[in-house]
Image (tube, grey):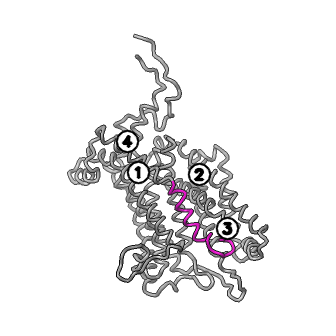
């Protein structure tokens, strides 16, 4: 019998989950949330509250279709209001899922495995919320199919030079790839639920969704190829989607919008708000479902680091925006920057500086990055700040037009707030249903990492 040997450190990927877990216990703990855990009063109350808020969307959209977009606060010259503000905000939130799933997969970052499934689902629900606003903003959502190029007898074709049309293709492509990526990743876990389910109904449902997965070598080979292919397709979408969204503003001649800094600035802001929303949702879920040993402090620390890094990029973008305005030799650009800082909407500008630049500086402290409660509060503040950023970009660039005679103020009406809060209700309803009917954590990836997490133990030859 030879002496135990120590395997080289380079094989060790770090304990992703608690050492006490076995392969069976990982499946039981994560799958048990769906199959075995009883529905609690807290979950029911949360679902009823989210569904009640969702009714605001139904009421606001119905009244909008009856009366027209005049029920919103938009006017001349502020033709864009809450609809575009919230569209950009929701698209930004949807960026974290694709980043965690695709880019971190290609970079072989093992810490993504405990959070990628939840982030992917969040992406899909956020893009659904975002897609509602442009459709409603047209005033005639039943004619939304006109935005797609299809053979028709009227010879009507979209205006391909319009950046709003670019949004249609960018967002629809982004949603399609994200949905396929999410579903492909679910297939092995759906098979696990199929095999462990106790009732015939759940076996049939999860069996149908698993598409005949048998965990054979051929299945795994094809799965890995498909995952890498989809990750390769999704990675450029992280950059392209919000870049195209920024073109809605950057290709115009409106002071405050006509700038080349918008594409990278919007992408960084999207990742920033997306990671903040992941933290906002995952910290309570981690606590409520007792997942502290799977979603560890390491995961929160890494997500906080990404949030801090992207927040610094966003702060750099704010600085460049002011620099370009003051040194552009353009009277209108100078006035726009000064108006943002001192005009009637100045309080919103300084609030976003407080939320997006000053507050995240606390994340330099490891003690704060590893404190779930404080990190959760900071993530909420960042989400508020990123919404205020979109408000400031849209409204302060429009309400003071080139002609003082057309200057006006914009204030959202009750119907603006109804649609916005309704999408928040839709988002939370979808999240709560997701955590109850599908595994929110990738079971098979955690099981594959278990042996690697223990390779530092002495191994007998």
Task: Specify the label residue 375 is tagged with.
Answer: 2
Nearest-to-viewer mark from 1 and 2? 1
Assign the N terminus to one quadrant of the image.
top left
Identify the residue position indicated by label 1 in the image.
Answer: 440
Q: Could you give the CA–CA distance between mark 3 and mark 4, rounded to whole angstroms?
A: 46 Å
Residue in the image at 63% along x and 75% along y: 395
The image position of residue 57, as x and y in percent, is 44, 74
Which residue is denoted by mark 4 in the rendering?
Answer: 444
Which is nearer the eye, 3 or 333? 333
- Whether the magenta-drawn stretch holds residue 243 is answered as yes
Which residues, given as a range, are shown in magenta? 236-259
Query: Nearest the camera: 10 or 369?
Result: 10
Quadrant location of the C terminus? Answer: top left
- Mark 2 packing: few (<14 Cα in 10 Å), some, or many (20+)? many
Q: CA distance from mark 2 to mark 4?
A: 29 Å
Name the residue that disc number 3 marks.
259
Label 2: element kind: helix
Badge 4 density bin: few <14, some 14–19, many ≥20, Cα 10 Å: some
Q: Is residue 327 left or right of residue 53?
A: right
Instruction: Tell which tag, 2 or 4, sits nearer the viewer.
Output: 4
């Amino acid at each position: 019998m030879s002496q135990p040997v120590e395997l080289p450190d380079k094989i060790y990927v770090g304990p992703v989950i608690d050492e006490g877990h076995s392969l069976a216990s990982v499946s039981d703990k994560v799958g048990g949330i769906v199959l075995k855990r009883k529905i609690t009063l807290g979950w029911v109350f949360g679902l009823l509250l989210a569904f009640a808020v969702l009714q605001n969307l139904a009421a606001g959209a119905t009244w909008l279709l009856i009366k027209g977009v005049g029920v919103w606060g938009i006017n001349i010259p502020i033709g864009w209001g809450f609809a575009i503000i919230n569209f950009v905000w929701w698209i930004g939130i949807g960026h974290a899922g694709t980043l965690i799933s695709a880019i971190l997969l290609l970079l072989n970052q093992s810490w993504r495995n405990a959070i990628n499934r939840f982030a992917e689902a969040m992406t899909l629900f956020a893009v659904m919320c975002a897609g509602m606003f442009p459709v409603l903003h047209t005033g005639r959502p039943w004619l939304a199919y006109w935005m797609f190029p299809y053979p028709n007898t009227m010879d009507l074709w979209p205006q391909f030079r319009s950046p709003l049309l670019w949004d249609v293709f960018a967002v629809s492509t982004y949603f399609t790839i994200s949905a396929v990526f999410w579903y492909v990743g679910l297939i092995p876990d759906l098979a696990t639920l199929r095999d462990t389910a106790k009732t015939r109904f759940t076996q049939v449902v999860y069996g149908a969704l698993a598409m005949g997965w048998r965990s054979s070598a051929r299945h795994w080979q094809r799965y890995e190829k498909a995952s890498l292919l989809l990750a390769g397709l999704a990675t450029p979408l992280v950059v392209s989607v919000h870049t195209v969204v920024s073109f809605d503003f950057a290709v115009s001649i409106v002071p405050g919008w006509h700038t080349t800094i918008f594409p990278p600035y919007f992408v960084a802001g999207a990742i920033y708000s997306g990671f903040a929303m992941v933290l906002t949702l995952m910290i309570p879920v981690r606590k409520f479902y007792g997942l502290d040993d799977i979603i560890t402090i390491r995961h929160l620390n890494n997500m906080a680091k990404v949030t801090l890094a992207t927040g610094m990029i966003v702060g750099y973008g704010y600085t460049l925006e002011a620099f370009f305005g003051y040194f552009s030799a353009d009277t209108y650009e100078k006035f726009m920057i000064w108006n943002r800082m001192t005009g009637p909407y100045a309080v919103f500008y300084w609030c976003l500086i407080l939320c997006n630049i000053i507050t995240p500086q606390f994340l330099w402290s490891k003690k704060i990055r590893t404190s779930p409660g404080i990190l959760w509060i900071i993530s909420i503040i960042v989400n508020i700040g990123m919404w205020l950023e979109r408000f400031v970009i849209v409204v302060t660039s429009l309400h003071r037009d080139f002609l003082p005679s057309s200057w006006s103020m914009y204030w959202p009406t009750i119907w603006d707030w109804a649609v916005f809060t309704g999408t928040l209700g839709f988002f939370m309803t979808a999240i709560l249903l997701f955590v109850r009917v599908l595994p929110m954590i990738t079971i098979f990836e955690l099981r594959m990492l278990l042996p690697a997490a223990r390779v530092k133990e002495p191994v007998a030859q």
